[in-house]
Image (cartoon, rainbow, N blue to C red):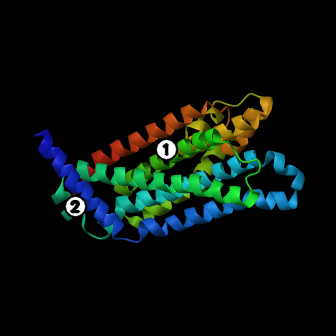
Amino acid sequence: MATVSLDRFRAVLTAEVRKTMSTRVWWLLFLPVLLLALAQSLLGSILQLLVPQATDTSSILMLAGLASALTMTAIVGAAFGTLLGTGDFRHRTVTLAYLTGSRGQVLAAKALIAAVVAGLYALFLVVVGPLLGGAALGGQQLPDLGQLAGLGAIGILVCALWGVLGVAVGTLVTNQAGAIALTVGYLLIGENLIAGALRAGDGSSLGDPSVFARLTPFLPGNAGDLATWEPVVSSAGLGAQSEFVLEFLAGVSAPPPGWVGLLVLAVWTAAGIALAAVVGARRDIT
């Protein structure tokens, strides 16, 4: 029985991969990632041109540029997952998809594909950005391999989780335009407004954030940003100023360790997929 179920899942996964590769969505969303890599790679050379004495800090600035690009790539990954989740509803192929396998198998296949593609976006950024930046700087003051690998691994995981969460949103909100607007709008605007409201009037500047402000690291977007920015701030050697800088970059108050941010985002992703599975199983598709 388990073998039959596994074979059916493989069939579902193969069908989903073929559908994904037959559309332009995945490579059209690759273009902004390429532009992010190019922009990040130019950071060091532009800085060296404008402020030659700042090259001693160029390695940290390159890490910061990579972290910033990774946070934007997470939005691209989330958009891809949302498009994948709504694709069958938009093209009216959802009934055929559910004939290939169970609804749970279709959701799992889409989540797996979204995680891989979003993770590959981040991997491309992590590899190509520093390579181009290194060529521009002539190899001077570049981050060491350990720093790049650590930040890259976190960024890939964050982007993969957002790809899966995008599938969950696309399964819950089957209208493609509405789902994309909700996902991207929340990450670009909505969460900033929520975090701003939670932090309004707190005493974080005095080292005493309010109870509401302490909730900001547990919002999904902030959690991913916290996990991404923490290794950069740690590498900068800012000492007592590290927490203040991390608060500013991640938009949070009283930030916990970066691994907590990853865990929070993973919990949000698991909850989103679980809710999508329940709602999807009960949805009438006739």
* Picture residue at 58% right of the left edge, 52% below the top: 126
Residue 196 percent across, percent down from the top left:
67, 46
> For the residue marked with disc 1, what is the amino acid?
Leu
Determine crowd level at label 1: few under 14, some 14-19, many 20+ residues with C-alpha closer than 10 A: many
Label 1 sits on residue: 157
Q: Return the residue found at the far front.
A: 138
Residue 129 percent across, percent down from the top left:
63, 57
Across the whole image, how many numbered discs are drawn on residues? Answer: 2
206 or 115: nearer the viewer:
115
Residue 61 percent across, percent down from the top left:
74, 49
> For the residue marked with disc 2, what is the amino acid?
Ala
Earlier sequence position, callout 2 versus callout 1: 2
Determine crowd level at label 2: few under 14, some 14-19, many 20+ residues with C-alpha closer than 10 A: some
* Picture residue at 45% right of the left edge, 40% below the top: 268
Q: Which of the image's four quarters has the N terminus?
A: top left
Label 2 sits on residue: 97
